[in-house]
Image: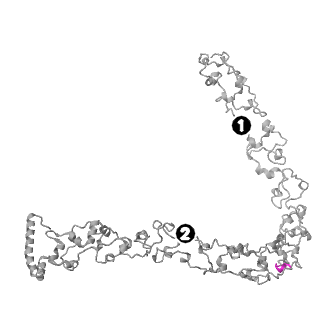
């Protein structure tokens, strides 16, 4: 606390006067006397950093008479603090008023002038430099290691050594935080906004193709970014060809993909790559980058002769082609050999007869008889072996064998039977065939025909096509209705061929519709088709409803309903069938035949004169519904009821008292010409 009253000012002046009166004699007395006076005046020893200011003559370096310690004198020595206060940047921004409030002295030589609670110190708020990422894990002394808590520059270079050797200062690198962060110092890739390595205006070497996928450190070792030598490909890449080519790498290789070499013209070597050779990787012939001239006069210069010299000096390309996959055979004609290939033999792979790979044998190969290659599946049934008698090369299956050469020619259905059905287990000889039952043991008529004589009714052409004279043998004529019916429809069981009833009801009683006419079925159902029934010789008039005109062309089901509907319940009235066709909507009653008849339905006997209102002129052309839109009876007869809306209002005559009586001026024949001519 400072004294500010006039009395205090006088007291301070008196105090300073007494101080000088006491100090001056001591000063004159010598240094030993001065030290004693200083100890008498000082409130205590100075801290070790201020020890050089001890002594009565040094007080004014910090103190001003009557004002105590003033900040301007502190900052005269502590220039870094003065900079922070003046610029408003750093820890001391806004703290230049009372230095002693934080840094009191005269507390002893070991007293710390700076007291900071490191655990609760808000570094970002107090200094303007927030500790983030890796910085948040550091101890205070890691950065403030020189005894100074202030005047630490926030730039990276103030603490971190520059890892990038900037030899070319004309184009310095960007600031550290352009690429690095305190969270992850490593850099996977440099953003194009910092450095676009594809822009020639920013770099001397533009990255293209495969260079775009290269990590920075692969070319810029030890973080050397500027300069980097790139005079040629060998600046970075080792020459794998051992100086065998006196050309630039880019003459063959491109940045898009170093391998394979897309533009190399192999014809320049004197050996043109064709067919399969054009698909071979360079290393398969040249090894690992070996580009010296290779021998290539014959195929065996590169390829091993897997035929073990069987073909002598014949060139490989006589049979093989480089234009086919795996150097397959191209021009070899087996007809030139002793065994021309025919039929199925032409489809056989070479390996099936000649073997495969290194063990393949092409000459000589036995082929005098079929069993040189094929096993005799008949186990000697045919001696001597003569496969060609039955088999042909076009198909090993016996399809064209002439069975007439045997003592059992195949006729009819026997021709469609597979050989194995008669010759089981490859038994081709000793087959009995004198009687049908030698093969067909499932004889169904054993109890009726004894001994069985199949050929009496059946033929080999069709077992079910029985040549049996039914009328002659049984007295029951199958024609016409039953002639197409299979035998088993009537003779259900194989032993029911005799004693069957011949009446229709014996078989068809269950299929007779309910309510059907009584009597014999054949009275109505005749002809080759059972349905529809035409009543035979009996006229429909017997039912009380004679068929005339259009009714004669209607099928029975048209009036009597679908099959199974009782025919005897059909209604003879017109409306029973034609109610939906009545265009008069029952307004003229239900006796349609009073006007219409079956012969000509649209030629009616109705005459409009019968109503007392004959149709004349234009009325004869009108449709019935034009006048009878609602009903037929009670239709008005005056003109106005129908034609009032057609009368023009601007005609003077229509405004007279005679207007409602149209027929006084107009006639049905000449309606548009008024007789009286009144306007």
Q: Position of residue 511 (x, y in %)?
A: 76, 50
Position of 32 relative to 478 (above/below): below
| Label 2: few (<14), some (14–19) or many (≥20) C-alpha neighbours in 10 Å | few
Q: Is residue 450 magenta?
A: no
Give the spatial CA distance, label 1 vs label 2: 91 Å
Q: Is residue 370 magenta?
A: yes
Q: Quadrant of residue 556?
A: top right
Q: Position of residue 335 (x, y in %)?
A: 84, 74
Is residue 92 among the parts visible in the rendering? no
Compared across the picture, whether 229 is left or right of 514 comes to left
Q: Position of residue 529 (x, y in %)?
A: 82, 48
In contact (CB < 8 Å): disc 1 and disc 2: no
Residue at the disc numbered 1: 578
Q: Secondary structure at mark 1?
A: helix
Compared across the picture, whether 657 is left or right of 104 comes to right
Compared across the picture, whether 26 is left or right of 244 comes to left
Q: In which quadrant is the C terminus drawn?
A: top right
**In the image, which residues are magenta?**
369-375
Residue 55, label in figure: none
Q: Residue at x 89, y 70 (%)?
A: 433
Along the line of sight, the residue nearer the viewer: 235 or 511: 235
Q: Residue at x 85, y 72 (%)?
A: 392
Residue at the disc numbered 2: 208
Along the line of sight, the residue nearer the viewer: 647 or 164: 164
Q: Secondary structure at mark 2?
A: loop
Along the line of sight, the residue nearer the viewer: 294 or 344: 294
């Amino acid at each position: 606390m400072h004294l500010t009253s006039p009395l205090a000012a006088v007291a301070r002046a008196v105090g300073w006067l007494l101080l000088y009166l006491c100090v001056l004699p001591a000063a004159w007395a010598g240094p030993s006397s001065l030290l004693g006076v200083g100890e008498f005046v000082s409130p205590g020893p100075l801290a070790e950093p201020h020890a050089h200011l001890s002594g009565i003559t040094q007080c004014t370096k910090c103190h001003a008479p009557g004002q105590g310690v003033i900040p301007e004198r502190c900052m005269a020595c502590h220039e870094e603090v003065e900079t922070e206060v003046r610029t408003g940047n750093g820890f001391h921004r806004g703290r230049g008023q009372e230095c002693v409030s934080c840094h009191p002295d005269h507390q002893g030589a070991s007293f710390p002038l700076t007291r900071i609670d490191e655990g609760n110190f808000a570094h970002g708020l107090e200094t303007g430099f927030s500790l983030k990422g890796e910085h948040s894990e550091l101890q205070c002394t890691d950065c403030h290691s020189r005894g100074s808590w202030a005047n630490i520059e926030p730039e990276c270079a103030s603490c971190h050594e520059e890892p990038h050797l900037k030899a070319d200062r004309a184009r310095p690198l960007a600031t550290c935080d352009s690429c690095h962060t305190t969270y992850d110092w490593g850099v996977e890739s440099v953003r194009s906004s910092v450095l676009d390595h594809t822009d020639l205006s920013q770099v001397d070497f533009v990255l293209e193709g495969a260079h775009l996928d290269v990590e920075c450190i692969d070319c810029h070792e030890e973080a050397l970014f500027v300069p980097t030598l790139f005079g040629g490909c060998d600046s970075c890449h080792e020459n794998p060809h051992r100086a065998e080519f006196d050309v630039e790498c880019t003459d063959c290789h491109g940045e898009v993909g170093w391998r394979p070499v897309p533009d190399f013209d192999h014809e320049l070597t004197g050996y043109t790559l064709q067919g399969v050779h054009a698909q071979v990787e360079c290393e398969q012939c040249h090894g690992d980058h070996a580009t010296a001239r290779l021998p290539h006069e014959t195929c065996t210069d590169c390829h091993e002769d897997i035929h073990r010299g069987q073909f002598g000096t014949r060139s490989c390309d006589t049979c093989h082609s480089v234009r086919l996959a795996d150097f397959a055979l191209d021009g070899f004609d087996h007809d030139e050999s002793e065994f021309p290939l025919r039929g199925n033999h032409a489809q056989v792979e070479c390996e099936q007869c000649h073997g495969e790979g290194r063990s393949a044998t092409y000459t000589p190969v036995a082929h005098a008889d079929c069993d040189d290659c094929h096993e005799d599946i008949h186990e000697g049934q045919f001696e001597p072996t003569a496969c060609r008698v039955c088999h042909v090369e076009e198909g090993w299956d016996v399809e064209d064998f002439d069975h007439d050469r045997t003592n059992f020619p195949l006729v009819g259905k026997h021709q469609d039977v597979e050989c194995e059905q008669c010759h089981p287990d490859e038994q081709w000889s000793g087959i009995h065939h004198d009687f049908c039952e030698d093969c067909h043991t499932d004889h169904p008529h054993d109890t009726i025909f004894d001994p069985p004589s199949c050929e009496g009714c059946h033929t080999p052409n069709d077992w079910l096509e029985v040549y049996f004279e039914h009328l002659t043998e049984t007295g029951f004529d199958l024609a016409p209705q039953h002639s197409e019916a299979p035998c088993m429809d009537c003779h259900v069981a194989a032993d029911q061929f005799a004693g069957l009833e011949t009446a229709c009801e014996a078989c068809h009683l269950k299929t007779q519709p309910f309510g059907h006419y009584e009597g014999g079925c054949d009275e109505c159902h005749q002809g080759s088709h059972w349905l529809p029934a035409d009543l035979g010789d009996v006229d429909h008039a017997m039912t009380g409803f004679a068929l005339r005109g259009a009714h004669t062309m209607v099928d029975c089901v048209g009036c009597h309903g679908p099959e199974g509907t009782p025919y005897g319940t059909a209604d003879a009235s017109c409306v029973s069938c034609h109610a939906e066709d009545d265009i008069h909507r029952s307004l003229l009653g239900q006796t349609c035949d009073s006007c219409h008849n079956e012969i000509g339905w649209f030629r009616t006997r109705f005459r409009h004169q019968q109503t007392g209102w004959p149709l004349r002129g234009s009325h004869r052309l009108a449709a019935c519904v034009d006048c009878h839109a609602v009903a037929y009876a009670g239709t008005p007869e005056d003109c106005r009821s129908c034609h009032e809306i057609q009368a023009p209002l601007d005609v003077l005559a229509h405004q007279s008292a005679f207007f409602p009586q149209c027929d006084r001026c107009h006639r049905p024949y000449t309606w548009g010409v008024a007789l009286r001519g009144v306007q």
